[in-house]
Image (cartoon, grey):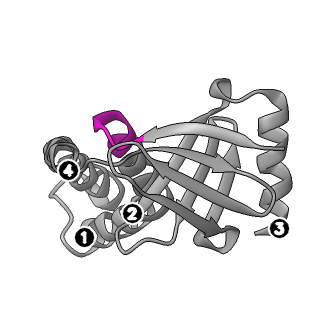
Amino acid sequence: MIVTRRIQSNFTSILRAKIYFFLKKSLWMYLTGTFLLGYSIPISSFGVFYSSLIYFAFLIIILVPLYYFSTKRIAKKNDFDADIEFNDKNIIIRHRNKEMVETKEWAWVKKLDINNLGVFLVVDNPHRFLISFSKNELSENEFEFFEKKNGNI
C-alpha cells in the first residue's frame, strides 16, 4: 500500500501543529503551573480553584494572539511544499519548490498518533514538525495503512 499526499507549510498546517503540540504537551504544564500559582497566590475571596481558573484564563488570553502572530510569521518564512509518499519500507519526499528528493526511513517518524480527528506524524526534525491528515482526507485503506504502521513504530 502506498499513500501519497501533498504537504505544504501554510498558516493552517502550522496552526494545526501548534494546537496539537499545545494540547499534547503544554496544556498540562500550564494547568499545573496556574494551579500552583492559584495555590500560592490566591485572589482574595475566590479561593484556590477559582484563582487558578482566572490565572489560566489570563494565560490563554495572552497565548492565543502569540500563537496567531507567530504562526503568521513562520508561514511567511517557511516554504515547505512537497509530495510525500508513504510506503511499507520508507517515506519519499519530492519537493515541489526545489529540485530535491529525500528518502527517509520510518524511524524518522518519532510518534504516530491516530485518534478520532485523524492521523498525526511527529517527525524527527531540529524544529518540531507535524504531518497531519484529517480522518475525512484519507480513504479507509489509507487509514488502515497508518494503523498498521502505528504498531511498528
Task: State the residue in front, 90 or 134.
Answer: 90
The label shown at residue 26 is 2
Q: Quadrant of residue 9?
A: top left
Label 1 to label 2: alpha-carbon separation: 16 Å
The amino acid type found where label 3 is placed reads Asn
Question: Does residue 45 appear left or right of residue 116 in this picture?
Answer: left
- State the residue position of label 1: 37
* Span highlighted in magenta in the image: 8-15
Name the amino acid type tagged 2: Ser
Circles 2 and 4: CB atoms closer than 8 Å: no
Pinpoint residue 122: horizontal percent, then vertical percent: 54, 61
Between discs 1 and 2, the one toward the N terminus: 2
Give above or below for 81 relative to 31. above
Q: Residue at x 29, y 64 (%)?
A: 34
Is 122 rendered above or below residue 54?
Answer: below
Relative side of 1 to 19, left or right = right
